Image: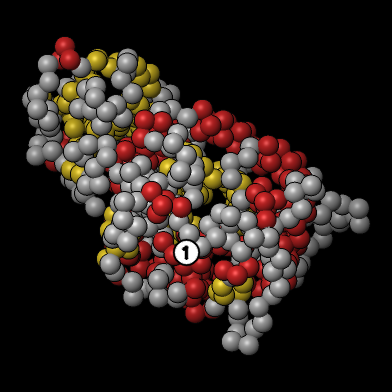
Amino acid sequence: MILFDRRRFVAASTAAVLTLRPRLALSQASSASVTLRPDQAGPTVPANFIGLSYEIEQLSDPAFFSATNTSLIAQFRALSPRGVLRLGGNTSDVGWWKPSPASPKPPMSVRKVVGEPSADLSYAIEPQAITKLRGFLDASGWTCIFGINLATNTPGLAADEAVFVTKALGPKLEYFQLGNEPDLFRNHMRDPATWNADRYFDEWLAAANAIQAKVPDARFGLPDTAGNPDWYATVVSRLLALRERTCPCDLSPAAACSCAVGPNAPALRPRIAALSHHYYFGGPPANPEVNINRLLQPSPQVDTLAHDIQAAAAQLHVPYRMTEGNTCYRGGKPGVSDVFAASLWAADYALKLASSGYAGINLHGGGGKQVANSLGGTLPGEDLMPDRNAPHPRPFYTPIADINGKYTAEPTYYGLLFAGHFAGATMMPLAFNSGPVNATAYAATLPTGQQVVAIINKDESKPLSLNLPGFALNLVLSAPSLTSTRVDLTEPASFREASTIPPATAYLLYNTRS
């Protein structure tokens, strides 16, 4: 992780002008206007804003998330000292809890559909994997959102698993998620003619109640859809029709209580920790519209999802999180998901969510085998490789790749690392006009009172002239080109004001005047 001394930075001179690439005449660069509004506080970015999402099938190998996997732990700690690991994905609905060697595999009814996991790819999660997961979380400093099978499970088995997970993970457990992208169950898990948000909620509530009965303090995130905002209205209205757990007897059946609740009182509402959804820019890999140019353009869908989930979460008074997403669904696309353009996309997307009040972001990745299994056993992007046997990050969008036994930070990782400097800060509204240049800007006030500004120039060819007095360059996210697989996240040799942001470069600037 790039480290810097903010005290040294504040004391640095701001008289010089810094250009990190060959100097460009200002006439060649479009001028950007930036107006900060420090008197208008935006949302506060949680300290655990940055996160990663993995297929929960990774737990079929207990050594993966364990305290002995020190190289992976090092990458997690470098990305964030207080991140959130989300375990779920498509494989969460073909996994089963195996508490003892003699435990039988439950029956699974899953239609075979291209791009979806089948019952043939089912796997067991055993207690030792959960115990080792706790060691990994302790060593990394991260916490966990834990996914439990909803599609091919029973409420009783879900509750038994939740009991063990709660005891094993303790304070490292953020909350449970039941089911993954239930809006897509119609494709292979349920009858498409009858499956809808109400049917989902009925099944979700049965499982959540079974868990809450055995784990009174259990909390849940939902609906974890593939990005279908129409489901929020149903889910919120159904939840609001249930009675909140406000009395001690609601939280513990053994608690002494004198309250009188009539027999016709509404059922209790499971404890809701957050609303959640997924977001992928596009897909599948063979789609020609999944390209760098479109990836780096603003996406109206991001704004739509943010607006809808924010309104729904406000009714429940809970936070909201993007728990799974990345560039191109179905494993990513070579030449798009695994190059520097994905770094700029990840940085911009993460800060866009932060400014929209999200509690966090979890970019999906992990082992190639597990992600392939989540898609029915293959990674479609491999068909686009000149040599599919060449060493390469798999899945193509993964923030951390296992290449020949070595864990390496990939382009999306660096985008998250750049955005992670806003963790704990309070976002600050700003007015930003970059003219014809494809660029974005974000600002925040750190807990120390210092202001930070991120300028992300996503334009492949146009530099951006910047006049931001009192702010000096602290961090540069760059690469030789948008298609480069090498990414640089560097500090300047000295902290100076920046006059020009080169094409395809992101700057992080801190104010030097109190």
Between 387 and 500, the one nearer to me in the picture: 387
Tell me the element at label 1. helix
Residue that lies at the very extreme toward the bottom in this rendered image: 102
In this rendering, the answer to whether 316 lies above or below 263 is above
> Could you say where residue 400 lies in the image, as x and y percent from the top left?
34, 57
Visible in this render: residue 205? no
Between 158 and 437, the one nearer to me in the picture: 437
> Could you say where residue 24 lies in the image, as x and y percent from the top left?
12, 20
Residue that lies at the very extreme toward the right in this rendered image: 263
Q: Is residue 489 left or right of residue 185?
A: left
Q: Residue at x 24, y 15 (%)?
A: 30
Q: Which residue is drawn at 17% across and 22% down?
A: 499
- Total label count? 1
- The residue tagged 1 is 370
Quadrant housing the C terminus: top left
Q: Residue at x 39, y 36 (%)?
A: 291
Q: Residue 298's image quarter? A: top left
> Could you say where residue 289 lies in the image, as x and y percent from the top left?
45, 34
Between 491 and 88, the one nearer to me in the picture: 88
> Could you say where residue 226 lies in the image, as x and y percent from the top left?
59, 45
Q: Residue 46's image quarter? A: top left
Q: In this view, does 203 lie to the left or right of 453?
A: right
Q: Which residue is drawn at 61% across and 74% down?
A: 97
Visible in this render: residue 203? yes
